[in-house]
Amino acid sequence: MKPKNNSNELLITRVYDAPIKMVWGAWTDLDQVAKWWGPRGFSITTKSKDLCPGGRWIYTMHGPDGTDYPNVTTYYTVEPYKRLEYDHGANENQKALFKVDVTFSESHGKTTMRMTMTFESPQVAKDMSQFIKEANGNSTWDRLGEYLEEKRNHKKVFLLNRVFTAPIGLVFDMLTQPVQFEKWQPPTGFSMKVLKGKVEVGGSVFYKMGNNEFNFYGRSTYQKIKPPEFISFTQEFCDESGKNTTHPGAPVWPAKWLTSVILVEEEPGITRITLKSETIDHSNKAELEAFIAERKGMMEGWNGSLDRLEKSLDLFSTSPQV
């Protein structure tokens, strides 16, 4: 999510694997809203909600550090299953920070949510984009996707969306060429080296990651590759010989888990990736609970990696082309 040049608007697009009535219900039913609204680690308590033009939603967001954030939202447009228009960030002591216009449309059982946030000026939009990123505000819409996945498909997954100012083919190459993902994929403070293997359907990549304190090994085995739109692969921790083992910092964890990446060119030169990780059927209850409990950690880890990917893509876009 980045403002266009000289624009006072930010645009968020998400496609959810759920019919529009289910998505609308998740937005408007208070019991459901409480299960996903807000960045990861936040919860909410609603005092009252009057979902109609001129109505107000009065609620408090509770931060993971115990800080409370009172909110008073005023609705301007309510078109069931189609559109909501409201302000955001107001409370009894301050005016709204911006206006939101969100539309919903369904195609083939999936719902597209398009959210436009309008600010006082292009500079405010730019500043707020950075603030939302730093506050993990975009994880709100990933949490909605996770909630819908569990409600519709009875699966608990981890979701993460990121938008890059780069053509889809270049982003795909950065995700699938070892010489590139060695540079951006390791956790912050770590380095990565692919020891052997090849990125191809049925193939695997065996790698080493480490820092000054310890090293660990892993393997990614590719299930499906559809350039430049889709990649899926299983992941596992290994010992030095390549045998499956546990991570030194996570003794209870799935032996293998599945990660899928969908790439969409939202407009020329703008690519959104949707990353989904889930346990594999033979994971036990304790492993599944550990996986779900680590969603916030996975978000922070992947975002750190994708921040480096973003910088790498920026370098490509500014380098002389020959």
Image (cartoon, rainbow, N blue to C red):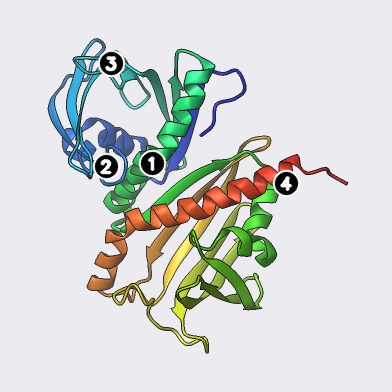
The outermost residue toward the front is: 212
Residue 305 appears in view: yes
Residue at image coords 37%, 79%: 246
Mark 1 → mark 2, Cα distance in angstroms = 14 Å
Please indicate whether residue 318 sits to the left or right of residue 305 in the image: right
Which class describes the residues within 10 Å of circle 1: few (<14), some (14-19), or many (20+)? Answer: some
Whole-percent x and y of residue 236?
45, 75
Mark 4 → mark 3, Cα distance in angstroms = 43 Å
Amino acid of disc 1: Asn
Amino acid of disc 2: Trp
> Label for residue 36?
2
Whole-percent x and y of residue 150?
29, 53
Report the label total: 4
For mark 4, what is the residue?
A: 316
Please indicate whether residue 3 sits to the left or right of residue 25 in the image: right
Amino acid of disc 3: Tyr
